[in-house]
Image (cartoon, rainbow, N blue to C red):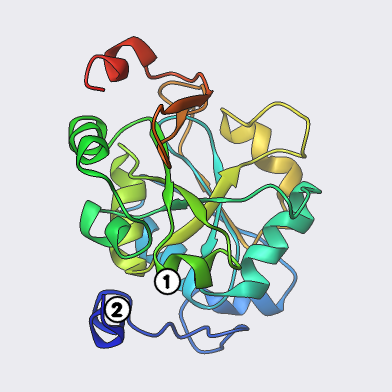
Amino acid sequence: MKSEDTAMLFPSPLAGEGRVRGCLCCHWLYMNKTLKISHKDKNAHKKAAEVIKAGGVAVVPTETVYGFAADAFNVQAWKTIYQLKGRSYKKPLIVMTPDIESVRALVDIPDKALKIAKKFWPGQLTLIFPTTELGKILSGGRSDLGVRIPEHEFMLQLLKEVNRPLFTTSVNVSGKKSAKKFVEVLSFDGKADILVDGGECRFSFESTVIDMVKFPYMIIRKGCLDTNEILKLI
C-alpha cells in the first residue's frame, strides 16, 4: 500500500503524540475526571471518539468483554493502557478496525485465511497475521499482529467515527478476570478518561484467538466462538 493510500485510509489524528484541547468532551482530560456515559446515548460513539482522538483512553463495551481502547497511532495513549493494566510490554495489544479493507492495511491476509475472516467478521474471532510495513510501524517492529472486527453496534460506530485503528485489550488488572459488566469497570473511574456503560456484555467471554501467520494454524486461546466451526473452513 502506497503512503498516500494509507493517508487516505487513516487520516492524521488530531491527537498526534499527545492530547489536544477544544473538543466537546476533552475538557475532562485536563480535570483528572472520568466522563461516564451510556451507550444508549445517540451521541455516545461521537463523545468517545472525541476523547480517543484527543489522546485519551476509553473503556468501552463489546459483545465479548469490556475493553480499553486508544488510538493505535498515539504511542502515549496505548502506553497508558499498559500502565493501567500493569501489563508487560512483551504482550501485544489487539487492533480493532471496522472493516477488512482497514485490516489489510496493517496485515497480510492469506487467501485461505481471508475466507475465514469474511465468514466470522464481524464477530468474536481475533486472527493473528503477518504485519505489513505500516503494521510493523504500528506494532513497534513486530512481525505479527492480532486483529478483530467486533460484532457490536456501538463499537462499529465508534471505529467508523474515529476512522483509525484502535489498540484494545480487556479491562482488568493483568492476571485478574476481565470485566463483563459495567460495575466491574468502575475501579478505573478516575484513571481512564471515559467509561461507556454498555450493561452486561452479550457473550461475557473473551474472543477466540487463532495464529494464522503460517500453516498449520494454531489456536492460541479458546473463546466464545466455536473453534470446530472455524476448523471446517481450513
Q: Is residue 43 visible?
A: no
Question: Residue lying furthest front in this view?
Answer: 215
- Residue drawn at 63 percent across, 69 percent down: 77
Relative to 19, say whether 61 is above or below: above
Q: Please give the residue where the numbered disc 2 appears in the rendered image.
A: 6
**Residue 12 left/right relative to 199:** left
- Give residue 133's mark: 1
Residue 234: x, y in percent?
26, 22
The three-letter code of the residue at mark 2 reads Thr
Mark pair 1, 2: CA separation: 11 Å
Q: Would residue 147 appear left or right of 99 to someone viewing this image?
A: right
Residue lying at 26% horizontally and 82% vertically, measured from the top left: 2
Left or right of 9, for residue 93: right
- Depth check: give the residue in front, 215 or 222: 215
Q: Nearer the viewer, residue 168 or 31?
A: 168
Q: Does label 1 or label 2 sit earlier along the sequence? A: 2
Q: Residue at x 58, y 35 (%)?
A: 182
Residue 94 x/y as whole percent:
51, 48
In front: 139, or 94?
Answer: 139
- Where is residue 47, by image quadrant? bottom left
Residue 144, relative to residue 193: is it above or below?
above
Q: Is residue 136 above or below residue 12?
A: above
Secondary structure beneath label 2: helix
Q: Amino acid at mark 1?
A: Glu
In the displayed structure image, the side of residue 234 where residue 18 appears, left or right: right
Q: Does residue 194 appear in the picture of this structure?
A: yes
Which one is closest to the eye, mark 1 or mark 2?
Answer: 1
Q: Position of residue 130 (x, y in %)?
A: 43, 52
Residue 184 rendering spot, x and y as whole percentages = 67, 32
> Badge 1: few (under 14), some or many (20 or more) residues near its Cα, within 10 Å?
some
